[in-house]
Amino acid sequence: GNSLLKGLLLCLILVVLTYILPLAALASVNTPPWYSWREGDFTVIAAQQVGDWLAPVVICAGAVGNMGMHVAELFEDSWQLHGMAKCGLAPSVFKYKHPQLRTPLTAVAFSTLLMVMLVSLNFERLMMIDNFFSVSSGLLEYA
């Protein structure tokens, strides 16, 4: 119990620092002025102020951060599907866990396959699908 609290507090501090430190560094330089910043300017400013070597580092850090959020969402959805299967709300094939890793392998594979299929759709189609499921879940909650 105590180690969970310490871990969560450490994560909170690290996440706050990963946002505050780069912003503080860029704001202290203020070249170009912060009100003119646009998407992708962190990379340009890093290259101008520190050197060309820092631009790919900033890009890689952003990519790794985005990948981390994607993987966390993937596994959260997979565990939720696994739990639903254990309660009888989803097909029982999603109950399977890998014997050594103890991960819901079929749920992870299904979630990955679903994401790969959704990537091929354009943004408007994705928004339609998202809105459909949001409204459906809202209706189910109040039914």
Image (cartoon, grey):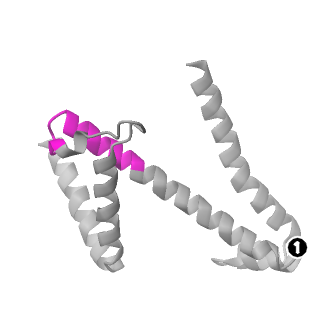
- The residue nearer to you, when weighing 61 against 96, is 96
Image position, residue 65 (x, y; %): 60, 59
Classified by dominant secondary structure, the portion drawn in magenta counts as helix
From this viewpoint, is residue 33 visible?
A: no
Picture layout, residue 1 above or below residue 70:
above
The residue that appears at 35% across and 60% down in the rendered structure is: 112
In the rendered view, does 56 fall on the left or right side of 64? right
Number of marks present in the image shown: 1
In the picture, residue 27 is in which quadrant?
A: bottom right
- The residue nearer to you, when weighing 113 against 26, is 113
Image position, residue 53 (x, y; %): 82, 75
In the picture, residue 29 is in which quadrant?
A: bottom right
Residue beneath disc 1: 50
The residue that appears at 66% across and 47% down in the rendered structure is: 15
Image position, residue 125 (x, y; %): 27, 76
Q: Is residue 76 magenta?
A: yes
Q: Amino acid at mark 1?
A: Val
Picture layout, residue 32 above or below residue 100:
below
In the rendered view, does 45 fall on the left or right side of 142? right
The outermost residue toward the top is 1
From this viewpoint, is residue 88 visible?
A: yes
Work out which quarter of the rendered image holds the C terminus and state it.
Answer: top left
Q: Dot 1: what SS?
A: loop
Work out which quarter of the rendered image holds the N terminus and state it.
Answer: top right
Q: Is residue 143 magenta?
A: no
Image position, residue 54 (x, y; %): 80, 72
* Residues rendered magenta in the picture: 75-92
In the picture, residue 4 is in which quadrant?
A: top right
- The residue nearer to you, when weighing 15 against 70, is 70
The outermost residue toward the front is 100
In the rendered view, does 139 fall on the left or right side of 65? left
The residue that appears at 24% across and 39% down in the rendered structure is: 95
